[in-house]
Amino acid sequence: MIWRLAYRLLLWLAFPWALLHLWWRGRRQPAYREHIAERFGWYPGRPERPLIWLHAVSVGETRAAEPLLRALAARYPGHELLLTQMTPTGRETAQQLFGETVTIAYLPYDYPGAVARFLARFRPRLGILMETEIWFNLVDACARQGVPLLLANARLSEKSARGYARVAPLTRAALGRLAAIGAQTRADAGRFERLGAHGVEVTGNLKFDVEIAPRLLQLGAELKQRIGQRPVLLAASTRAGEEELVLDAFVRIGVESLLLLLVPRHPQRFGEVAALLEQRGLSYVRRSADRALPPECRVLLGDSMGEMAAYYSACDLAFIGGSLLPLGGQNLIEACAAGRPLLFGPHMYNFAEASRLALEAGAAIEVADATALAQRAEKLLWDRAALARMAQAALEFSRAHHGATARNLAICERLLEKRV
């Protein structure tokens, strides 16, 4: 009880900060200042049919949820689907993927009143939380109102597990109230169980089931045609402080006419990265300019949303960002699905199992630092046979791990049957 009271007190003390956070983020991303009422549990309209709700915090989780949401729509055509996020980029991604076929809204902050209004408005028959979205008041309120919650595509790094262990009573209570957990790997399942979870199943990673949209394949082909015969190194989802390292590596690679396709992880940093390129005297073109690349162009700056699959299709070799610095890495599965050879740094702890399996499959190579990145990239770009072998291994690795959608859908069916 004292832990719950402390948590609620902390939430109320953070209330001014929450408003300040929205205002401050809105300076660079004005969308943060939109739909603020939803963040406190106020929504227009009510569902007219039974509703299934899925929460995906941002872009990566929303994309991962796509195959499960489409499977739910096919299995339960008489139900409405509600998809909630916490970020404007996640919301924009949801609109790109689903349009008007699902209801899109922000999940409220974890204040008891806001959570109560959310549940009263939508009355979900089933809730699905993607990956590691464990909000203590939300989970408690769903349990008290009889809304079964599935933690789907669940992953928990050792670092995150240590954080949850610091508030063990709250964590144990929340995990105990979940109706089911579908963990990505056996290691993830073990960490959840050590924190007090029960009913954990290993269902695999939904991201392996995401299919590349035909329009993105077409866009990738168009980009490749625009680039011409030049070899392309993609640096995907790079983070602050990492672009400098990638550029250090890029200028050391002795491959004639090599083009760097540089895609920062967060859209609010596009301008910052463009300034870095200017500072370094590297000729570049923004993807948003949608124009031909002059021969002297050395960098194509991927300043767009929702086109990563096209970027993978257009490259010869991909480096996974967030991994040269201790940031946990980024999702490598989309690159494998596109059949692209991979390089990543030593810090892939948020995707430890997927990166380990990709290494074992021969689809990826780990590099220690920027110097090793330059050396390995140069060697591979000169060895087209090695690139082809890695590309085939990436495709086979991706196809071998399909099936998470069916396993998660089976859990959803079981939970919904209990409510009939």
Image: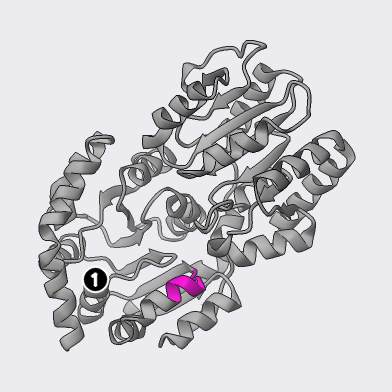
In the rendered image, residue 160 lying in the magenta stretch gets the answer yes
What span is in magenta? 155-161
Q: How is the image coloured?
A: one colour
Q: Residue 223: x percent and y percent? A: 62, 23
Q: Residues within 10 Å of mark 1 (few under 14, many from 20)?
A: many
User: Left of 354 or right of it: where is 397?
Assistant: right
Q: Nearer the viewer, residue 361 or 281?
A: 281
* Residue 119 percent coordinates (x, y): 19, 66
- Which quadrant does the C terminus fall into? bottom left
Given residues 224 and 164, the one toward you in this image is: 164
Does residue 374 lie above or below 158 as drawn? above
The residue wearing badge 1 is 138
- Position of 346 compared to 53: left or right? right
258 w.r.t. 354: above or below: above
Q: Is residue 318 left or right of residue 385?
A: left
Question: Where is residue 323 drawn, in percent x and y?
Answer: 57, 53
The type of residue carrying mark 1 is Leu
**SS at badge 1:** helix
The image quadrant that residue 42 belongs to is bottom left
Where's the N terminus, which quadrant? bottom left
